[in-house]
Amino acid sequence: MSKLTKRSVDALAAPRKGQAFKWDGELRGFGVRVTASGLKSFILQYRNSEGRSRRIVIGRYGILTVEQARAKAKIQLGSIADGKDPAVEKNGRKQAMKVEEVCDWYLSEATAGRILGRRNRPIKSSTLAMDSSRIEQHIKPLLGKRVAETLKIADIEAMQSDIASGKTAKPRTPGRGGVTKGGAGVASRSVATLQSILNHAVRLDIIASNQGAGARKIAGKKKERRLSVAEIRKLGKAIQYGKQHGEHSTALAIVELMLLTGYRISEVQGLQRDWLHSEGGYVHFPDTKTDGQIRAIGPTAIKLVERQAVFNSSPYVFPSGITNGHFTAGKACLARLCHFAGIEGVTPHTLRHTFGSVAGDLGFSELTIRALLGHAARGVTQGYVHIDEALKLAVTRTSDEISELLNESIMDA
């Protein structure tokens, strides 16, 4: 790590979202931060006499030179060595941190694994990615400049209303990536993210209080949409049409596997070959939305997985043809298929709910269905795996039933 210079600071590129850092190779904790807007500020990261991690802004680049900022950082480090804490005002109260500063603290600490989430474990990278998106797209634009400790319930619920009405929505930009939308769902989740961040900050003594703790979230609509038997047949015809008219074969296989397994789209697209245990009839997911799981998979779905060609020694069943990661366009393919089939209101979750509903139609119990979908309470799924025949029968009959409906268009041809 080299010493910070004007050239190295000028060369530090702004990230597409969030923030990026460059640290000095000589003065420990001294660095520069650049945000997505291109704003660069000198910072000092340190631990106070109590061992708590702190970060302060020394000044903005352009107003201060690198050497001026370095000199100020040395002064601050000297006071820290004497037991003082620059992040605390003379009267003993913490400096009034803005919401954007608390959010930046959260992302930095959580990324380093120092903030614990569910089941007292480090927060997952997938969760942090969603949190970061909500912070940058919704929370910061609406409340970023507000002092965190002064936020009231009315402020947070007003933010929720603004997001729901589309105030922070943005049009699609050229290139890859999604669209920032409003709506009740993202508004409610943004409130949940902010509340969680503020609660972590209070618990870890970053701010004194969270006065907006009682803010109410908009109730979400329960996702009950399932495909009818006729719609499954229509989707099967659309898949066959897609195979004959240039639809990506990997995307089609992802859609089909979601229906045949009830797995989440992230689980299907990120499926790795080593996780499949064909002889045992299960997939071992090391990390899912509800932690590591063993999930049953039927012979029909196993054959579909095993038919997928290996690409450049990729560990993924559905590798990306562009990056070293996995395929990510399954949702877009599903939308095109449904448009062709004339089916409305379908999401990847609809396919998951359809699998569970078909299992219910076949007479399997709610507990069995929950185990198939990975919704079972802690330990239930693992226990069911030991009742091999019960779970194997359920997943086999359900996936076979769906497969027959999907392929009726072939048999009718």
Image: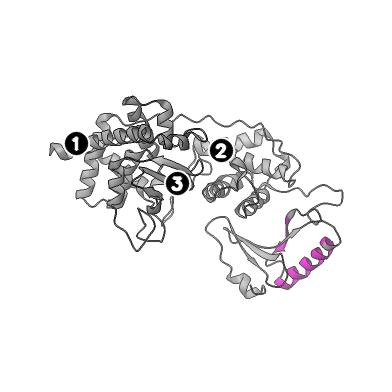
Q: Is 84 or 277 nearer to us in this picture?
A: 277
Q: Which residues are magenta?
A: 54-80
Q: Is residue 158 left or right of residue 323?
A: right
Disc nearer the start of the sequence (2/3): 2
Q: Is residue 110 visible?
A: yes
Q: Any magenta on residue 52?
A: no
- To which residue does mark 1 refer? 408
Q: Residue at x 62, y 55 (%)?
A: 112
- To which residue does mark 2 refer? 162
Mark 2, residues whose alpha carbon is within 10 Å: few (<14), some, or many (≥20)? some
Percent position (x, y) of residue 94? Answer: 79, 48
Secondary structure at badge 2 equals helix
Disc nearer the start of the sequence (1/2): 2
> In this view, which residue lies farthest toward the left?
413
Secondary structure at badge 3 equals strand
Q: Single out the mark in the foreground, 2 or 3.
A: 3
Q: Is residue 248 visible?
A: no
Secondary structure at badge 1 equals helix
Q: Is 331 or 286 nearer to us in this picture?
A: 286
Percent position (x, y) of residue 280? Answer: 36, 44
Q: How far apart, in angstroms, are the residues tagged by discs 2 and 3?
A: 38 Å
Q: Residue at x 35, y 39 (%)?
A: 261
Q: Is residue 69 above or below residue 354?
A: below
Percent position (x, y) of residue 385? Answer: 42, 37
Percent position (x, y) of residue 322? Answer: 37, 61
Mark 1, residues whose alpha carbon is within 10 Å: few (<14), some, or many (≥20)? some
Q: Single out the mark in the foreground, 1 or 3.
A: 3
Tell me which amino acid carries mark 2. Answer: Asp
Disc nearer the start of the sequence (1/3): 3
Q: How far apart, in angstroms, are the residues tagged by discs 1 and 3?
A: 32 Å
Tell me which amino acid carries mark 3. Answer: Phe
- To which residue does mark 3 refer? 285
